[in-house]
């Protein structure tokens, strides 16, 4: 291939990467920012989803040591057949290491009243469930245990926690942010990266 053709090929490749609006690291990992999407889900339920890039380094030897890299977090509001108003908070990971570690956890910070700070929290963590080990969600997390628990559903690399709306007592649309905690409570990932989602 002639030098002129090589330069044209390089220019075209650079233009494609630039148009995608993201950069790629040495290991081919996207380093873009979080993005938010609003839509109506099935049955008219309102859903807000925040997508987050794969941006946590895999500084671990085994799955049990790996921090959770958040892929997306969403909030969905719906009403049950019995008229109960519910909120479903879902967190999807690039890889979820369920049942392996009692240290890593996901904390959902919630703003239910338009204040300057979060006024409620929901935790998702590995816990002991009826003699078995599995994921749990609840309002409190201390010493590796989740309390005031809510129903949770695990599907692949996604966790969904179902919370009665009346327990949060929102006075506005709930804003939220997901934090992934690793060893020592260190925050290894956020979605969105800055500020709130769902406002």
Image (tube, grey):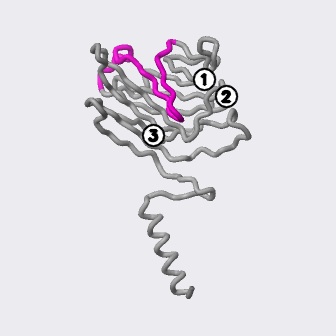
Q: Which residue is mark 3?
A: 192
Using the numbered discs, state the Cα–Cα distance from disc 3 to disc 1 in whole angstroms.
23 Å
Specify start and end residues of the magenta stretch as a single range: 148-172
Quadrant of image for the N terminus: bottom right
Across and down, in percent, residue 32 comes to 49, 52
Across and down, in percent, residue 152 comes to 48, 22
Is 38 placed left or right of 54 in the picture? left
* Along the viewing direction, whichever of 57 and 44 lies nearer the viewer: 44
Q: Which residue is mark 1?
A: 126
Q: Secondary structure at mark 3?
A: loop
In the image, which disc is placed on residue 100?
A: 2
Q: Secondary structure at mark 2?
A: loop
* Along the viewing direction, whichever of 163 and 112 lies nearer the viewer: 163
Judge whether 147 appears above or below 160 on screen. Answer: above
Residue 178 part of the magenta segment: no
**Label 2 with label 1: CB-CB less than 8 Å:** yes
The residue drawn where x is 62% and y is 33% is 97
Q: Residues within 10 Å of mark 1 (few under 14, many from 20)?
A: many
The residue drawn where x is 45% and y is 33% is 177
Using the numbered discs, state the Cα–Cα distance from disc 2 to disc 1 in whole angstroms.
8 Å
The earlier-in-sequence mark between 2 and 3 is 2
């Amino acid at each position: 291939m002639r030098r002129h053709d090589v330069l044209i090929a390089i220019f075209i490749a650079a233009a494609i990467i630039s148009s995608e609006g993201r950069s790629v690291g040495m290991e081919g990992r996207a380093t873009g920012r979080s993005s938010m999407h609003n839509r109506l889900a099935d049955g008219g339920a309102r859903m807000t989803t925040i997508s987050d890039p794969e941006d946590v380094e895999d500084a671990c030897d085994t799955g049990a040591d790996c921090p959770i890299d958040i892929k997306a977090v969403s909030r969905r509001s719906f009403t049950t057949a019995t008229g109960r108003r519910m909120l479903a908070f879902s967190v999807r990971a690039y890889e979820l290491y369920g049942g392996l570690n009692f240290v890593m956890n996901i904390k959902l910070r919630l703003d239910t009243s338009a204040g300057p700070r979060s006024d409620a929290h929901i935790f998702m963590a590995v816990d002991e469930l009826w003699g078995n080990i599995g994921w749990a969600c609840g309002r409190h997390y201390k010493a590796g245990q989740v309390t005031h628990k809510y129903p949770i559903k695990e599907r692949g690399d996604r966790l969904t926690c179902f919370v009665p709306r009346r327990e949060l007592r929102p006075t506005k649309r709930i804003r939220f942010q997901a934090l992934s905690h690793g060893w020592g409570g260190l925050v290894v990932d956020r979605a969105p990266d800055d500020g709130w989602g769902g406002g």
